[in-house]
Amino acid sequence: MMQPTERLAADIRGEQRRAMWGARRRRRVLRAVALVLVLLVVLPAGALAVLLENPEALQAVSALVVPPQPGAQPWDGRSRVVVALFGLTQRTTEPARTDTILILTLDPQQRRASLLSVPRDLWVSIPGYGAGKLAIAYEVGGPRLAVYTLQRDLGIPVQYYVALTFHSFTHLVDALGGVTIDVPQELKDPLYPCLTTTAYCPLDLKAGVQHLDGATALEFVRERHAFAAQDLARVQDQQAFLTALRQQVLTPATVLRVPRLLTVLRQEVSTDLPYNAVPSLGLAYARVLPARMTPAYIDLASGLVQNGWSADGQAILTPTSADGIPALVRRLTHDPALTGAGATVTVWDGSGSPGLAADVGGALHRDGVTVAAVGATPHSGRTRTVVVRNTLVAGANDGALQVLVRMLEAPILTRPEHGAHTPIVILLGSDRPTAP
């Protein structure tokens, strides 16, 4: 048995080793930051090349301008990630709700991505609210409820969200220097809605290759009345805009615009992705190989949804089959780490909310997670959800742990979890999103 003096000496040596490795890591980051700062000043194209290959350096530089939000779950810029992109209608005469929903699945290592357009009128079950259009989830419960609805009802393993209002979209595009788009047809709409009132602001955007500023780019992605197939054409234009945005991000001048972009981001964009990781996300998306970019749509043309009516007379979209949308979602978004060895979880409710563990367990199952058990935990009265690496069961999948941490916006603990027989345990707190 180790004597107290030996234990103390071992602890001191351990602290010294950790301090040494921490100092080495800080020196590496500082050297990378110094190199990038020099390149930013003297060689924008060279700086871009360095940042493309070194997301840690990019995040370190970005943090000098905009530090990450307190409590934000980090992203290393290299791991596979699923991000919900919400375009909000938030004129002065209406509450914020999602006008556009895009799901970006990005694999930086494989330089592969998909963009899934999800219709705002899809009829879903919103936790704490009931049945309603998907667009309503943001209005009644904010981004966390909107994300949880996507996870729970559609099985989309969202890890982060980015929400843009009309004005924040406009300002971000302007900060980027605009974007060049080949407008497929003239967009002429005398009934185009103004941004801040219920009045009309007639639109006439000519066809052809154009460099659009923020206001005109917003008109391009919002317009639908000029098309025979209104919503289908609009979501295609939205995906075309994101494709054009990739090309703009890769121009050398983008490096010099990063400080302005980060300032707009901090002041005007709602996101739980760490602020300093947003440039890493943008550059990783811009580097996706064209042949590995997959656009996908949940719409009438794809046959995945059909027109319908709600009991209270709303025009809605409903799935045409039970397995059509889930099959597409699994193909595009599910992370292999969630189904790999050591990814089995137990879900325990510590909040005292009836049915919460079953609800979250069901959502995780649709995300591809193997849920071995659900129930209540003796750790009652929890206010914060945590993801536990259960030391009583060996072989926890590190990749799955990190995905779950980002999906649940929860810290990770390493400790024995008695009574659980899985390597990963999720303890639910009262912070789980519900509608008011």
Image (spheres, rainbow, N blue to C red):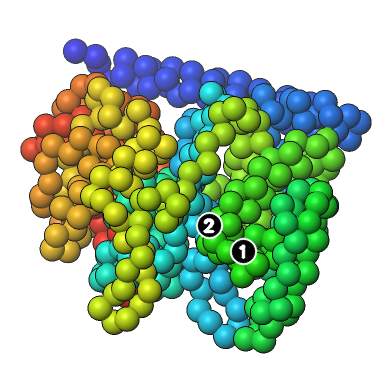
Q: For mark 2, what is the residue? A: 232
Left or right for 200, reference 377 = right
Q: For mark 1, what is the residue? A: 227
Q: Element type at marker 1?
A: loop
Question: Residue shown at 76%/48% (left/top)?
Answer: 182
57, 212: nearer the viewer: 212
Q: Quadrant of the C terminus?
A: bottom left
Question: Residue shown at 31%/32% (left/top)?
Answer: 338
Q: Position of residue 340 (x, y in %)?
A: 28, 25
Tag 2 or tag 1, which sits nearer the N-term? 1
- The amino acid sitting under disc 2 is Leu
Residue placed furthest toward the left: 419
Would residue 41 be seen by someone viewing this image from the given angle?
Answer: yes
Would residue 268 be seen by someone viewing this image from the given angle?
Answer: no
Q: Nearer the viewer, mark 1 or mark 2?
A: 1
Q: Position of residue 47 (x, y in %)?
A: 80, 29
How many labels sit on residues? 2
Q: Position of residue 351 (x, y in %)?
A: 20, 60
Question: Residue shown at 55%/47% (left/top)?
Answer: 274
Left or right for 171, reference 374 = right
114, 401: nearer the viewer: 114
349, 340: nearer the viewer: 340
Q: CA distance from mark 1 to mark 2?
A: 9 Å
- The amino acid sitting under disc 1 is Phe
Circles 1 and 2, Cβ within 8 Å, touching? The answer is yes
Residue placed furthest toward the top: 1
Q: Element type at marker 2?
A: helix
Q: Quadrant of the N terminus?
A: top left
Left or right for 291, reference 398 = right
244, 235: nearer the viewer: 235
Q: Position of residue 105 (x, y in %)?
A: 48, 39
